[in-house]
Amino acid sequence: MKTIFIEENKKIGLFQRIKKITRENNRIIINKKIVNLGLKNKALIIKRIKKILERENVRQVVIEKKLKEDEQFVKLIYSNNLNLCSQKWILKRCTDKIVDLILKEKKKEESEIWICVNEVDSLVEEYIYKFAKEFRRINIITNHISKFKKIEEKLYNEEGILINVTNNRRKSLSKAEIIINVDFTKEIINEFNIYEKSTIINWDEPLKIRKKRFNGKIIEEIEVKASNLSKLVDENEFENYDERDICQAFEIIPNEIRFS
């Protein structure tokens, strides 16, 4: 997917003062200090950026870390339906690595994993097949049991693997140590009886478990170290950007991750 990088001009000359934005290679340069602009001027800049993206058929943008700090600017990007690289992309594609870190010395073939999901896409399906072969048991929690019948039958017929597909809100997560929440809202998740020491890898909106005794962990973002990135790009060229965004822009899975 073609990506454009958006950043502030570090050296604004006379020509740049005349033009609010300039287009250079794979970048859009903003020739203003965003922090000094009012909402109206920020909106005007986003409008001009959007025109460039539409003209060049660009569907994805990355903004440098400094611009991320301006909440107004970020909200304007989203309200104009621009596809901004987000930390969720890297979280989703590193879920198997996260699971490995959670388990530590515990063996997968002696463990279970739970996935809360209603809609199936290629990534979800890939993880279901992967974890079904690795774990002692995989549990799919869903309101749309019929959507998982094909996967269930394929695993049984081709691999002899049985998976548990259920929508039981009282019992299904009561013993769940590792939960991957794909697309359940926080309201739905909190309707379940959740094991108080669960570790939840949350792909969806920010999550808080209301259960008073819950003292588990919710993982919603990770830190990465992508030493493999240098094979594709000059890292100095992107030193002002979040490394997770760069990974998404170039579709690179980092070889090192960590979370608090």
Image: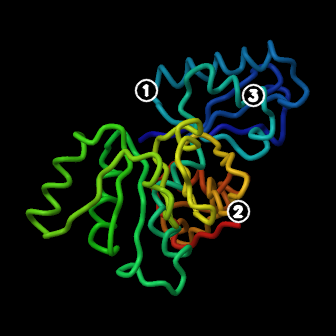
In this rendering, position of residue 167 left or right of residue 35: left
First of labels 1, 3 by sequence position: 1
Toward the viewer: 120 or 245? 120
| Residue, far right | 36
The quarter of the image holding the N terminus is top left
> In the figure, 126 relative to 186: above or below?
below
> In the figure, 31 relative to 107: above or below?
above
Toward the viewer: 258 or 234? 258
Residue density around tag 2, few if under 14, some if 14–19, many if 20 or more, within 10 Å: few
Image point 48% across, 20% down: which residue? 54
- The amino acid type, in three-letter code, at marker 2 is Asn
Q: Which residue is identified by label 1?
A: 57
| Residue, far left | 157
Q: Which mark is residue 215?
A: 2
SS class, disc 2: loop
Q: CA distance from mark 2 to mark 1?
A: 46 Å
| In front: label 1 or label 3 | 3
In this rendering, position of residue 163 left or right of residue 114: left
Toward the viewer: 220 or 13? 220
Residue density around tag 3, few if under 14, some if 14–19, many if 20 or more, within 10 Å: many
- The amino acid type, in three-letter code, at marker 1 is Asn
Q: CA distance from mark 2 to mark 3?
A: 35 Å
Residue 27, by quadrant, is top right
First of labels 2, 3 by sequence position: 3
From the top left corner, tell me how far across and down residue 183 is, in percent. Answer: 47, 41
Q: Which residue is identified by label 3?
A: 73
From the top left corner, tell me how far across and down residue 92 is, in percent. Answer: 48, 54
